[in-house]
Amino acid sequence: MTIDFGEFQFTAEEFTGLILFALAFLVQLVYLILLIKFIFSGKQKNQEPNSPSVSIIITSRNYIEHLQTLLPTLLSQDYPEYEVVVVDDCSTDGTDWLLAEMKISHGKLKTTRIIQETDFPNALAISIGVRASSKDWLIYLSPLCEVSDNQWLKNYMQRLEPDKEVSIGYMHYNQSTGNYKSWMRFENFTSYLLSGAGKAFGLTMPVFEYNIAYRREKFLELRGFAAVLDSPFSENELFINKIATSQNTVVQISKTSPIAYTGETDWYDLFEFKKKQLMLRRKFNAGQRFFRSLNLISRLVLTASLILLLFVSPWKFWILGGWSFLVIFEMTWIAVATKKLGEKNFIPMLMIYKAFLPVINISFMINQLFTGNKRKWK
């Protein structure tokens, strides 16, 4: 069977492949345009210094050594009005003694303690931290995080203008350890770029629960996690997902605002991170799920139709050229994004990872069909 278009004739397989390739190509091009818009959103429009008051909230369970490293840097930030609130969540390693000692010499440090386990430990610890805080903005960090220097807070807060209510920052794995460090970096980086691209449609989706911020007033106004307590995991990400819009949200993209994760990464961490992302999507709205699914499906269709056309079409070199243009265009802007977010030295491996990303996502999705309801998350 052949299909005629004037002087051109196509077999049914070739025509189908061309249509699918063209549609997938255009969809991916739109995603790249949104990515470029996100990259340029990092430019500071208002050059006037912006310094709203802020509380840095850290919940910690048996991370005394990490607190000894992190807290001195946080307590020496060059910022006019801030405080550090540490919630000691049932620690048994002497964290309470460390915090009591540090409070003597650091007036910006506040501490509180949980002494009994609950069914929702993360939500409780965060809520207690919010109640103990007193500033306009709340930023969440982990004891396993590190900030670059004493200018980090100033750089992070300067984009949070009066009309903003939510900030989503980046966390990189450059300083982590373990055999799966690179894969975690790829997962983290790719998810963050997709979230930033979705901001244009008000479809911002948090990737992780640290280096995110929102106004304390908003948390109290909505009675904290009351709207998301049907999910016993990732309450903070889901809360931001409830209140974030294209107008009130800043997705940070600069060298100076990211934080570093310093823990160890292994296969279990990668698997749990991926599973958590897939489970979070069940809580996303229809627009968010469509935005992410369309990206995944269009990548699969683009690859499948390319392979088909290389076998059945006489235009294979033109088609391969178009695909190559898209790949080069994408990697060029991804290279710009890596510099903006402080990532480095992983572009070649990232290309290989992105080629297999649709297959990886599908395998995890299939796995979730059988295991997703067997465990509860905390």
Image (tube, rainbow, N blue to C red):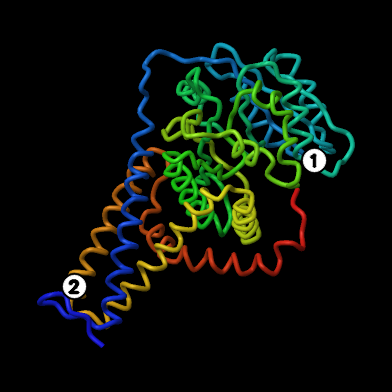
Q: Is 225 on the left or on the right of 319, as rendered?
A: right
Q: Is 145 on the left or on the right of 112, as rendered?
A: left
Q: Position of residue 125 (x, y in %)?
A: 77, 34
The outermost residue toward the left is: 7
> In the image, which disc is placed on residue 341?
none
Which residue in the structure is indicated by mark 2?
317
Q: Nearer the viewer, residue 75 or 357?
A: 357
CA gap between label 1 and label 2 equals 57 Å
> What quarter of the picture does the N terminus occupy?
bottom left
Q: Nearer the viewer, residue 9 or 198?
A: 9
User: SS at mark 1?
Assistant: helix
Which residue: 25% across, 63% down? 324
Which residue: 45% across, 48% down? 194
> In the image, which disc is placed on residue 121?
1
Q: In this picture, is 306 found above or below 279?
A: below
Q: In this picture, is 113 found above or below 46?
A: below
